Image (tube, grey):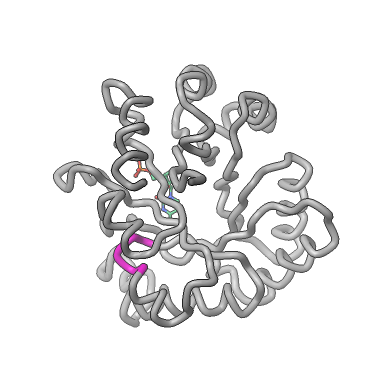
Amino acid sequence: MPSPIIIALDLDFKDSLNLARKLDPNKCKLKVGSQLFTSSGPKVITILKDLGFEIFLDLKFHDIPNTVSSSVLSSVELGVWMVNVHASGGEEMLEAAVSVLKKVEKRPLLIGVTLLTSLDQISIEKIGIKINLKDQVIRLTKMCKEKGLDGVVCSPQEISDIRKEIGKDFLLVTPGIRTNSNLVHDQKRTATPKEAIENGANYIILGRDVLQSINPSKEVEKIYKEIS
Ligand code: C5P
């Protein structure tokens, strides 16, 4: 089966390449986020692709529609497999991102970030979101689906509720994955790899659990077996 595992390369350039060379592109895809992209630039994408990996460019674009659609178009030139935008950028911004991709032949999957997995009910209230967290995630997910995105990033704890509302035909990508519930770091809405997949996640993002393990490639193999 194609692997649902995405490894977050939240490392510097040298450490990212060292890790990538130990991983199997058949067992995981790689996520390049703001840390690695800011320190290394687009060349890191080319190098990782040459090692055989599909790349999720996780820059969470959140800007005016024109800027976001131009940035999404630039990600097409990089040949990434998946790219994301913040759903809270609003309908017009989502429409612009989708519309620019209609004009290209080979396009990445376009995913909307709902609410960061590091936020909980209290933190969203502090930024003025006064409704229930799950309702807000569902509201943004429905908006992304309506506007023609391919899926959303959400926490593993919302998968079942989202699936009930929007059905099977939409990608759910879940960070906040922890094999040990005592080591959540800054994440607030977490689950194990198996729980996330059983609940209906299409892809799970693993960062520190793998990056800080003694043998990251063995850890990926172990998780792959557990969820296969
Ligand atoms: O180390 P950890 O497993 O917490 O890493 C999670 C990764 O997923 C990080 O790279 C983080 O930027 C990313 N992410 C997230 N929450 C989102 C979207 C992406 O944690 N909503």
Q: Describe residue 120's horizontal placement relative to residue 74 as left or right.
A: left
Q: Where, by quadrant of the figure, is residue 197 drawn?
A: bottom left
**8 lies above or below 101:** above
Would residue 228 be counted in the magenta stretch? no
**2 lies above or below 22:** below
Main SS of residues in magenta: helix
Q: Where, by quadrant of the figure, is residue 5 drawn?
A: top left
Q: Describe residue 101's horizontal placement relative to residue 159 as left or right.
A: right
Q: Describe residue 205's horizontal placement relative to residue 112 as left or right.
A: left
Q: Nearer the viewer, residue 58 or 214?
A: 214
Q: Describe residue 181's horizontal placement relative to residue 145 as left or right.
A: left
Find residue 79 and report its horizontal and vertical position in percent: 73, 41
Find residue 49 and report its horizontal and vertical position in percent: 65, 30
Find residue 57 and report its horizontal and vertical position in percent: 59, 44
**Residue at the spot x=61%, y=55% of the render?**
61
Q: Nearer the viewer, residue 97 or 196?
A: 196
**Residue at the spot x=26%, y=50% of the render?**
192
- Bounds of the magenta span? 155-159
**194 lies above or below 159:** above
Would residue 156 be counted in the magenta stretch? yes
